[in-house]
Image (tube, rainbow, N blue to C red):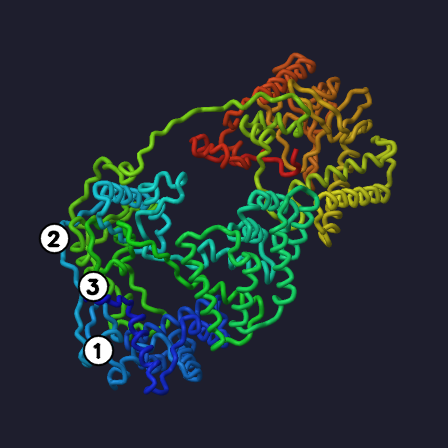
Amino acid sequence: RVWETPQILPFAAFVAKLHDSAQHDPELTGVRVPLTAPQERAIWESIVADNELGLLSSSAAAQLAASAWSLAHHWGIASRLRRYAATDAPGADARIFAEWAGEYGRRVDALDATDLARLPDVVRKYLASGAIDPPPTIVLAGFNETSAQQQALIDALVARGAACERLEPAPHIATPLRAACLDQNDETARMADWVAARLGANQHARIGVVVPNLEVRRGAVTAALDDALLPDRLLDSACGRPYTVSLGGALGAVPLVAFMLRAIRLLLGEVSFEEASSVLRAPYLADAVSERDARDMLDARLRVRAQRRIALDAVVDAAERAALESSLGTPLLLNHLRSARRWAQSQGRRSRRPSEWAIAITHALNLLTAAGAAGPSLDSSEYQALRRWHELLAEFAALDRVVARLTPVQAVAKLEHLARQTTFQPDGGMPPVQVLGMLEANGLDFDHLWIVGLTADAWPGPAHPHPLLPVELQRAVGMPGASASIELARARQQLLRFVTAAPEVIVSHATRDGDRKVGPSALIASFPAYEFGSRAARFTDSVRPIALQSQRDATAPVWVPTVIRGGAAILKDQSACAFRAFATHRLDARGLELAVDGFSASERGQLVHDVLAHFWREMAPATHEALVTLSLQQRHTLLVAAADAALSRLRRRSGVRLGALAQLESARLVRVAEQWLQYELGKRSGFRVVSVEEARAAQVGPLTFTARPDRIDELLDGARLVIDYKTGVPIPGTWLDERPDEPQLPLYLVALEPDARAISFARVRAGDLGMTGLAADPSTLPGRSMQWSARFASWPALVSHWSAVLERIATEFGEGRAAVEPKRGAQTCRYCELATLCRVNERGGVVDVVEVDSAADAGIAL
């Protein structure tokens, strides 16, 4: 009454189906159960690990051995390996593999099993004996290269009466054209434009793109197709791609599965902070939607106090502390983390069999995902990935057959390895454009076909005989890759099939590879040239027409006068880039912190400031004369106390347990501070410290804020010197500019100490000490005093200039000037954290980055 649905199977699945019929036949006894691919890999890894050969990667060696075993059986040379290997010297690769292969066969036999490489031979014997019946009709599609093992099975099927046909598409009469492109980027871009033009002309056209080294060029090819076919994909992320890629990626790289693996690592041991952060912010974590913003804020807070590696206990403790210290409401997240911690403490520290680990891991993940409750609805590809993840856990559990008990570390490593080795490609239907590798494109039929990458050095590919198999045997049976002549013959056959696979065929190649010229493959050099004309209508032009409007808005609302935090940093940022000041001090935009071990650069700089401030506060009197009379032991004692006080203050502020690092940092602080005090003893005289980080109100234009000068000294003549400590590289050279890079010292002088006669950076760096500044009398400063008299008639004139410059900058900030205008172009933007917000790179404002000696001050955040 209806057509019978054909069973369309890959060769391996077809063989497994025939073997399954024998395995479930009650009249057949002694049928061995085949191993799974993960079980086979586990045996090979065990064999390689047992042979101490000093290998850099036993896992890679095991994978190489498994592929050699499979190829040897596919091409019918397995029985001849030992005889050939016996002639090799001890330690030769082929001889070592022969020994491994013998051990592998013994271990598989001891399990009363067979493996996937030998399964076609087992099925062939059952067919020959009449134990299983063949299907009445078999159609072979894409069998352009038939191995000896495949041919033997096909012959056995025919001998038992199966009708065997070959599916060959009708050849097209086409004149293939050769497209010479500038480089690989130009080649993929032109290919994508061509695809867009053909799809724009006919949305139902069958278009093929063949890429010889697809695993390498996949990212570039998909990016070019996205750009040509989906230019608005960032605005409409739900739009489906009109193309599919035959080569799947690793299952472990799929976002949902990557989250599962990271979560397991966090539950069972230490992970990097970035991994822990991604778990906390993942949309797959239970109740992620309702607490999304709060979790993002919690993550930003944790970054300030986290180390680079972190365990679950530390994550929970930090989250609890952050919840107590602020209004961050993440009660649901804390409940899930606490449940996971209880599981990890009671269940996550003992060895188990793989099947027991599979159950335990599933339970642990359910605690974090609440079995999917309140989580995001999965799309089709995510649902398929989740289903494949459960299948992977089942494969992991099946390792009981070949693996003993595993520790938590071993279990995680084994599961991650399986996820990396498992290829995943979600079923996306049949879109009009197919991106294929060379082998996947065999036997297919298209309306339009483009083959990329056919350069002289890439195609035909070089000979690459398997390193663990005798080369003579590989060449004798015509194994792919065994010799250059075999690869040339294969390339000719493939080209003949491709040029008849569509009415329009384009082959392309790059003409340059970096600085090196490359030419076309000799097999396509005689093809007529393809002329690149004007770009035709794109696929998206007819599907999603959009009228764009643009508006330039570089003015923010006027600042409402009030006390504002930031002080000199506001003027510094406004001088560097108006948008930076607006985003940082009015939008409160900040870059995320990077977790570090120990102390960050800003913390180390602040500690130096705190030590010196504490020292001078404890000095009585705080004068150069008192410093001279202080003994080395007394000075050392004061500095040790100052370092302890600074570290205690940091500990209270951050909540970080410093441990032994505190002792090391204390010793560094004392050493740096002693060097600086020794510098002041030798280079300066007759000063009195009158102010140390004293909070004072400052008014500049419309801005009112609290300023804290690091230090103000009074000299012998009564003049005052304003000092700012720098543990990085100070940048005083632009003090006289209309947009000074470091305006804090001119600000302190104008707003707080207008009668001061000098300002100076104090460079407090181990082995690099000094003072750099400006003074009414150059002899006031012991270090380098910059020249100002050529531009200003007097010191009051210079102070008046600074007053005008700072008021103008402050007024611009108050009036809302927020244009993206970095003072030094790329140099200004290099260390700015707001590039994704202002998008200066997309505007073409930054084209180059210049390294300069006066880079950002690594010492202290103003």
Instruction: From the image, tell me which residue sits under label 2.
Output: 173
Q: Looking at the rendered structure, which numbered label has been put on residue 489?
A: 3
Residue 737 shows up from this direction:
no
User: Nearest the camera: 8 or 262?
Assistant: 8
Closer to the eye: label 2 or 3: 2
Spatial CA span between label 1 and label 2: 35 Å
Closer to the eye: label 1 or 2: 1
**Taking 855 as reference, is 496 above or below it?**
below
* Residue at 20%, 69% in the rendered image: 139
- Within-10-Å neighbours for mark 3: few <14, some 14–19, many 20+: few
Residue 329 in picture, x, y percent from top left: 63, 45
> Residue 825 vs residue 748: left or right?
left
First-in-chain label (2 vs 3) = 2
Spatial CA span between label 3 and label 1: 29 Å
- Within-10-Å neighbours for mark 1: few <14, some 14–19, many 20+: many
Residue 34 in picture, x, y percent from top left: 38, 77
- Within-10-Å neighbours for mark 2: few <14, some 14–19, many 20+: few
First-in-chain label (3 vs 1) = 1
Amino acid carrying label 1: it is Leu
SS for dot 2: loop
Asked if the residue under mark 2 is in contact with the one under mark 1, i.e. CB atoms within 8 Å, the reply is: no
User: Nearest the camera: 486 or 150?
Assistant: 150
SS for dot 1: helix
Specify the farthest residue to the top. Answer: 793
Instruction: From the image, tell me which residue sits under label 1.
Output: 157
Quarter of the image holding residue 165? bottom left
**Taking 8 as reference, is 602 above or below it?**
above
User: Nearest the camera: 160 or 117?
Assistant: 160
First-in-chain label (1 vs 2) = 1
* Residue at 82%, 44% in the rendered image: 641
